[in-house]
Amino acid sequence: MTAELTQSLTLAMPELILAAGAMVLLMIGVYSGERANTTVSGLAVAVLIGAGAWMLVMGGDGSAFGGAFISDPFARFMKLLSLVGSLVTLVMSVGFARAERFDKFEYPVLIMLATLGMMLMISASNMLTLYLGLELQSLAIYVLAAINRDSLRSTEAGLKYFVLGALSSGMLLYGISLVYGYTGNTGFAEIAAALGGAERQLGLVFGLVFVLAGLAFKISAVPFHMWTPDVYEGAPTPITAFMAAAPKMAAMALVVRVTMGAFEPIAADWQQIVVFVSIASMALGAFAAIGQRNIKRLMAYSSIGHMGYALVGLAANSEAGVRGVAIYMLIYLVMTLGSFAFILGMRRKDGHVEQIDDLAGLSTTNPVMATIFTLLMFSLAGIPPLAGFWAKWYVFLAAIDAGLFTLAVIGVLASVVGAYYYLRIIKIMWFDEPAGGFVPMTGELRLVLALSGTFVLLYVLPWIGGSVGVMAEAAAKTFF
């Protein structure tokens, strides 16, 4: 075996662990039937932990498979976030699966395959690797969204996501073909070299627009957000939690890598696109969520808004901006997982509830649960000194340093408007008449909710916030 192949296999070992693990677990599930459902879920958690451990202990820097796959500090940081998102989602699903007869062995296998696609996306340094990773992730999530075949809402959600996802994939492929046609390359470094040594052509800008449109769909940024509220509401709640967390990490990492890598020489062009998408996402996320009564739909619009805030950092086109994006995505992941742990705990004796009005008087019936969710809502709104405030602080500061004052001001105003619907939930929990309590949360949900609440409250401490900042800075230096 040649040294190059050995290096390639070593760098891609986390992905190989996930791929082999998914195949083995699929065979166990097929041949053991329903008896193996719990076993497969437990083994899936172990495989995800194993992939993450290998990456942290044995992971190195370098390129693999002829430059199509890259491993660097940025890739490891974002892969770790994706793995954590997938892992926590699987753990949170245990109680839901038991209560809702959602215990299917295909579920953890599809989560693993989607995570494999995410990790390929994050390490992509070639347009073809980018597309393969994106499609592997998307195909698994299409099935996950419609996995509850007895539910009309779930089937509808899966179908909507599939149809619109196919449209976005077509746009992405068209953009890639245009870029290849004008540069003669699919590798990010080669595209950047071609763009840096030649005059920019209009067709290439069209290619850039189509590539960014395809990627914007995956982070549910405006104007490619239309699938998000319906799919979030219709998909089973653990699937919604997964879609809101892990895939966003990979898609945002891919947007950063494509813009800061392949299209860095024409930054003036993509900055305009990113600024527009950022402003539109922040505005829609702030205003459209105000009238929502279903908490999963509200979280969908909240997610759209938060992707807009994260893009503020990218628009700055600086090391501080990329650092801000990395910090924002980590804090967003923690807040989202905590919020969905709470939503999964919204259960009465006759089943799960999803309406915001069902939270009325929760401070009386379950004060601890209400207190932690209040912290998460304040953090999502960006109230200091909670973690959500610092997430916005870093991206807005990067925008101001880059001279994007209008973008920063619009971001702050959108954040103020968005605070309304978070505060409304807090008001309903603490000041409305009780609508009845929830059954006790499972141990897994209590743990996730407690850890996320602790993180957002104590982020201001140097040993938490400082450590995150150091890791994010190391990731950002990859591009500078």
Image (cartoon, rainbow, N blue to C red):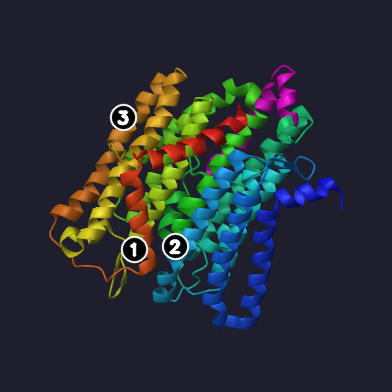
Number of other residues with Cα within 10 Å of mark 3, as a class: few under 14, some 14 to 19, many 20 or more = some
Q: Residue 42 appears at what percent x and percent y? A: 53, 71
What residue type is disc 2 on? Answer: Pro
Q: Residue 126 appears at what percent x and percent y? A: 72, 39
Which residue carries the number 1 mark?
A: 446
What residue type is disc 3 on? Answer: Leu
For the residues marked 3 and 1, what is the alpha-carbon distance in whole angstroms? 34 Å
Q: Mark 2 touching mark 3, by CB under 8 A?
A: no
Does the segment drawn in magenta span residue 377? no
Dot 3: element? helix
Dot 2: element? helix
**Who's the residue at 80% across and 50% down the image?**
6
**Who's the residue at 59% across and 50% down the image?**
56
Q: Is residue 45 above or below residue 77?
A: below
Which residue carries the number 2 mark?
A: 238
Magenta residues?
Answer: 190-218
**Who's the residue at 56% across and 58% down the image?**
141
Number of other residues with Cα within 10 Å of mark 1, as a class: few under 14, some 14 to 19, many 20 or more = some
Dot 1: element? helix
Residue 413, labelled with which disc?
A: 3
Q: Nearer the viewer, mark 2 or mark 1?
A: 1
Where, by quadrant of the figure, is residue 174 drawn?
A: top right
